[in-house]
Image: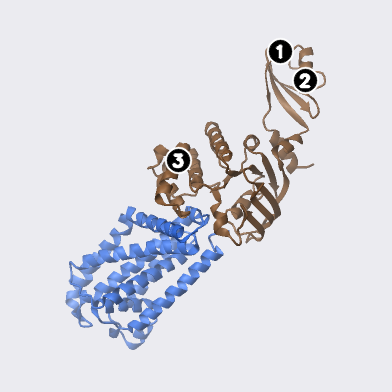
Chain colours: A blue, B brown
Amino acid sequence: MTAAEQWIAFYTIVRKEIRRFMRIWMQTLLPPAITMSLYFVIFGALIGSRIGQMGGFTYMEFVVPGLIMMSVITNAYSNVVSSFFGAKFQRFVEEILVSPMSNNTVLWGFVIGGVARGLLVGLIVTMLSLFFTTLHIQHIGITIAIVLMTSIMFSLAGFINAVFANNFDDVSIVPVFVLTPLTYLGGVFYSIDLLPEFWAGVSRLNPMLYIVNAFRYGVLGTSDVNVVTAFIMVGVFTLAAYAYCMYLLRSGTRLRQ
Amino acid sequence: MALALEIKGLRKVYGNGFEALKGIDLEVKQGDFFALLGPNGAGKSTTIGIVSSLVKKTAGEVRIFGHSLDSDIAAAKRQIGLVPQEFNFSNFESVWDIVVNQAGYYGLSRGVAAERAEKYLKKLGLWDKRHGASRMLSGGMKRRLMIARALVHEPRLLILDEPTAGVDIELRRSMWAFLTEINRSGTTIILTTHYLEEAESLCRNIAIIDAGNIVENTSMKALLRQLQKEVFILDVRDSLSADISIPGFDTRFVDEHTLELVLKKGTSLNEVFAALNSSELVVSSMRNKANRLEELFVSLLNPK
């Protein structure tokens, strides 16, 4: 296929992916909006007002970047895992496998679909947060870069999950039992400076801590961890996930008999 | 004539150790209407799966219009349109989206995709259903949707894996007419089917596969010439007695106006007519008992 034809094929997947999550907006866009609004009301406005300052900011200002990032992560991941597994489950992934599209076109089509949902939900949550606080983004470049890299990384991870998933339980296990707990413990609601030294050290093993703090640095200008380390880590994980996805597609693991 | 499909030494061993294909060779000429027959589990779908790159081969070589699946897979894939046995489209998408998106996967612009989708949906009687979700279609319509989807990039080789399974006879015949038209326009067709009369009436060449081996590969005419006997059904004007016999022929009384007559190889129809005349039977109509190919098929698979 020529580059122009690959572009059309890529655009076809992206368009289909975006139309899919827009068509089922009650399942994809509305739930995070409601959940995050509740977080803002309960943790930010009701409880947060009694907590006082965190890292030099009001508690609401402190939690907003983490909650935005949490929405981006779970939605980018969920979009790819549910869409690609659905295609496998109903066997219409064969439409793609018999076509002359390159593996890169297939992978990036699904990944950009995940990124689109992650960013759209992130934008919705950001807009909602403005009802509760004001956001003065300190480092726009870092904010955009980390949110883009993170959504790509988790879209790739969702793709890997979808390839290996055998049923719908396998699709929800990682978001529910891995992503959400790691994000909760990754400094969304507190600064690790508040933890005893041992638990602060344990927290530093959690990759979510770096992602949340890098985003918080972009928005508020403050972070518990080194932002450069966060970018290197996200970059390395993204490259590793990309390489593994390409291996899975090339080898046909779980896709071709 | 150029080859649409060339298979050499194709082997497939599945992960559980089952050897589905034992090194088959097969050639399908450009423009052919080719039947690939065999009992369940013989290796037909595995062969089609490998050719359409949904199944990984263990060994051997596959070329589609000269393009190797190993070294030139994108060009090879572009030549093929696949209509699989099982429904494999999204239940939530519209008929239109399924066909147009498939065109997009082959790099066709939206304009060309829309033009082709209209052409094939109209030809296959799905135009009025184009905005409906695919899950709302009847079984026959779903089969036709898969044919429209397979044709939208106008492949040179169309592979149909039991396309008329579960389709009523009227619809089956309209699909036969459509496939014949597509073949006449230059598309090579490979068909697997359990309806042997379908293969007999549509296909010019045939391969029979059994237990992972090709047991017969010849033209339909040559295969049918192997028949040792043919059975004709005679509709007789006057009432027959149950002990009716026609000298020189095996017969079977079916009912008082119907008789089966066995014509052995080498016997001419003129001899039949002469015998009928001397028996003073008035035959109002005569037809070949279907399933000529079925008899051969069974005898090839059970050579005893």
Residue at 47%, 52% in the rendered image: A90
Q: In which quarter of the image is the C terminus of chain B?
A: top right
Residue identified by numbered label 2: B270
Q: Where is residue B39 in the image (x, y as percent from the top left)?
A: 66, 44
Task: Give the CA distance from mark 3 to mark 1.
Answer: 51 Å
Against A254, residue B285 (above or below) is above
Q: Which chain carries label 1?
A: B
Which mark is in front, 3 or 2? 3
Q: Earlier in the sequence, mark 1 or mark 2?
A: 2
At label 1, which amino acid type do we have? Val
Give the SS element for disc 2.
helix
The tag on residue B119 is 3
- Which numbered tag is attached to residue B92? none
Q: In this view, does B32 lie to the left or right of A226?
A: right
| CA separation in Å, label 1 and label 2 | 15 Å
Residue at 79%, 18% (x, y): give it.
B246
As drawn, A157 above or below A218: above
Q: Is residue A256 visible?
A: no
Closest to the observer: B73 or A14?
A: B73
Q: Which residue is more in the foreground, B39 or B164?
A: B164
Residue at 54%, 38% in the rendered image:
B166
Q: Which amino acid does label 3 sit on?
A: Lys
Tell me the kind of residue under disc 2: Asn
Q: Do the residues marked 1 and 2 share a common chain?
A: yes
Select label 3 or label 1 by which is in front: 3
